[in-house]
Image (tube, rainbow, N blue to C red):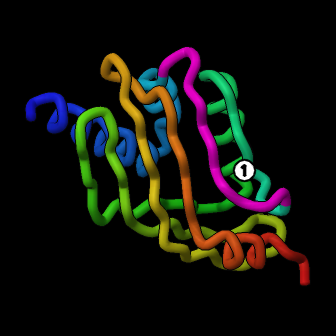
Amino acid sequence: MALVDDNKKLVQGLYDAFGRGDIGYILDRVTDDVEWVTEGPQSIPYAGSFKGRAGAQSFFEKLSAVEGGKVIAQELIAAEDQVVGLGRFAGTVKTTKKKIDSAIAHVFTIRGGKVSRWLGYADTARVAEAFSAQ
């Protein structure tokens, strides 16, 4: 049970770090071979599969297309080496000035006290619409 609690604390710490804009904190807590995947169409700049710490950093750089992006983690569910974060993502797309407010689910896989895989799910139709110039 202690490992599950440690994993939940790790994930909560990552959400807290994102909230204060400390991406370095997050990158220090991913494995060198981390797989970072956000499901969605190409019209969402940060959608796709990113490999390794540099890939995860690239994800966060692309995510900066959303101004004031914040994650509200409403619930963490943990079992063995996985933690699922449920909540909302909100912000404004810089280029279109359209708002995003989407339910999210994040699946973290933990190995050796670090994130080895992250899968992000959102209402991709709503997010893609916010990136659309129309």
- Residue 74, given in percent of the width and then of the height, sits at 30, 65
- Reply above or below: 122 against 53: below
Three-letter code for the amino acid on which mark 1 is drawn: Tyr
Question: Of 116 and 17, which appears nearest the observer?
Answer: 116
- Reply above or below: 110 against 46: above
- Reply above or below: 96 against 8: below
Q: Which residues are magenta?
A: 31-42
Does the stretch in magenta take in 35?
Answer: yes
* Residue displayed at 49% across by 19% down: 31
- Number of residues whose C-alpha sits closer than 10 Å to that of mark 1, classed few (under 14), some (14–19) or many (20 or more): many
- Residue 43, given in percent of the width and then of the height, sits at 84, 62
Locate the N terminus by quadrant.
Answer: top left
Task: Name the dominant secondary structure of the magenta segment.
Answer: strand
- Residue 4, given in percent of the width and then of the height, sits at 18, 36
* Residue displayed at 63% across by 22% down: 52
Horizontal side, residue 108 vs residue 101: left or right? left
Quarter of the rendering containing residue 124 = bottom right
- Residue 117, given in percent of the width and then of the height, sits at 50, 33
Horizontal side, residue 96 vs residue 85: left or right? right
Horizontal side, residue 108 vs residue 131: left or right? left
Does the stretch in magenta take in 132?
Answer: no
* Residue displayed at 45% across by 69% down: 88
Instruction: In the displayed orientation, state which residue is furthest to the bottom.
Output: 134
Residue where numbered disc 1 is placed = 46
